[in-house]
Image: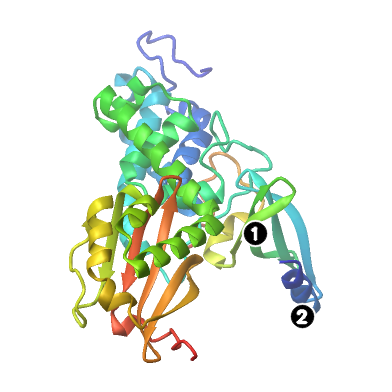
Amino acid sequence: MLDLLIEARVAHPELVVAEEAVNGQVGLALRSRGLVVAVVGMRTEGARVTDLWVVLNPDKLGGWREPLTGPLDFEREKGGR
Amino acid sequence: MAQVTSRVGEERISTDGLEEFAAVRPRLFGIAYRMLGSAAEAEDIVQEVWIRWQGYDRRQVRNAPAFLATTATRLAINAAQSAHARRETYIGPWLPEPVDTSRDPALGAERAEALEFAVLLLLERLSATERAAYVLREAFDYPYEQIAEVLQQSEANARQLVSRARKHLAEERKSAVSAAEQRRLLDAFVAAAQTGNIAHLEQLLAEDVVSYSDGGGAVRASRFPVLGRERVAKFVHAFAPRFWTGVEVAPIETNGRPGVALAKDGAVFAVLTVTASQEGIDRLLWVMNPAKLGAYVPVAG
């Protein structure tokens, strides 16, 4: 994974990697010019990461692209399935 | 509840129902998201609940939060059933839509249960009703009586659904972590099959083991799954000459599971993979369909 991240950063120096709370666990968000291009869910056992789930499907990253809207804002743009 | 029209006296609910809805909105989203693994679909459910709530005679509703959660759960069950068909045709492995839980770590629930990717992926394999029962119990701490009401089942059934879901998840987790143990069991199984030792085969198999063969109609293979420890052991024993005599066995990995490729005269004719739990091997998958063996290179030598 580290190799992958390094490779990605070399190929795309504008990529910003940040730690995020992904589904209740520590995860990562990769942003390119402020736009989230990937979210990584992780599972850890002790100090070791046992699983990584890399979500690149843009339809599934809609929630990471904009600030959370108010509780009754139904105008929020809906992404695909 | 601030906007109560106390003048009429009979209305316990705010006139537009907005307040009651807003109060449980995160909970509705939390239920639907856990059941569907999709924030976009969960959002659709929440909106659908709002529309129905608007059209409903709200004066009839005694417990607005319970009513709204029930509506959301039932809509999510329907959505889960139709999502299942769509995901069959999804290109590549399906993953849940990730959600940011920095603001609300439990995502609208009492507990941060059924939220991790690992659990959502396992939930995906349960029936929609089992999923709902599990989510309401584990994440939202619902009493069984209430779960029964939401699912229109008896209380005993609701308990059964939750316990079955728990059991499934525990089993899946168990087999998911023990890749090395699965490999060990598979190697021991192959050794016992080669020597035709029935007693030894039985020791390695779980009581409720199932053996599936995929011949695709092109080669001779059992069309029906073989069930149970004794039958599977006998089945394997009966086919020993065909399978293991003069056969080269090469360890492989398919979909992250340990397997072996069986080759005769330099051509792979079967791939065997297993899954296992603490009780032993619980699934044997024999792929003998030539159309599915193309990717396996014949064993050298």
Q: Is residue B177 above or below residue B70?
A: below
Q: Amino acid at mark 2?
A: Ala
- Name which of mark 1 and mark 2 comes first in the sequence: 2
Q: Is residue B47 left or right of residue B269?
A: right
Residue at 47% across, 65% down: B187
On residue B29, the disc is none
Mark 2 residue crowding within 10 angstroms, few (<14) / some (14–19) / many (20+): few
Residue B76, given in percent of the width and then of the height, sits at: 36, 44
Q: In the picture provided, is B102 more to the left or to the right than A9?
A: left
Q: Which quadrant, please, contains the C terminus of chain A? A: bottom left
- Whole-percent x and y of residue B218? 20, 83
Do marks 1 and 2 share a subunit?
Answer: yes
Say which quarter of the image contains residue B11: top left
Question: Image quarter for residue A38?
Answer: bottom right
**Picture coordinates of residue B80, whole percent (x, y):** 35, 50
- The residue wearing badge 2 is A11
Camera sees residue B175: yes
Q: Is residue B54 visible?
A: no
Disc 1 residue type (three-letter)? Val
> Gap between marks 1 and 2, in whole Å?
18 Å
Q: Secondary structure at mark 2?
A: helix
On what subunit does the disc labeled 1 rest? A
- Residue carrying label 1: A40
Query: What x and y, as percent, mark residue B123?
Result: 43, 47
Q: Which is nearer the eye, B202 or B88? A: B202
Mark 1 lies on a secondary structure that is strand
Which residue corresponds to the image point at 59% horizontal and 50% vertical from the top-left? Answer: B99
Q: Nearer the viewer, residue B34 or A51?
A: A51
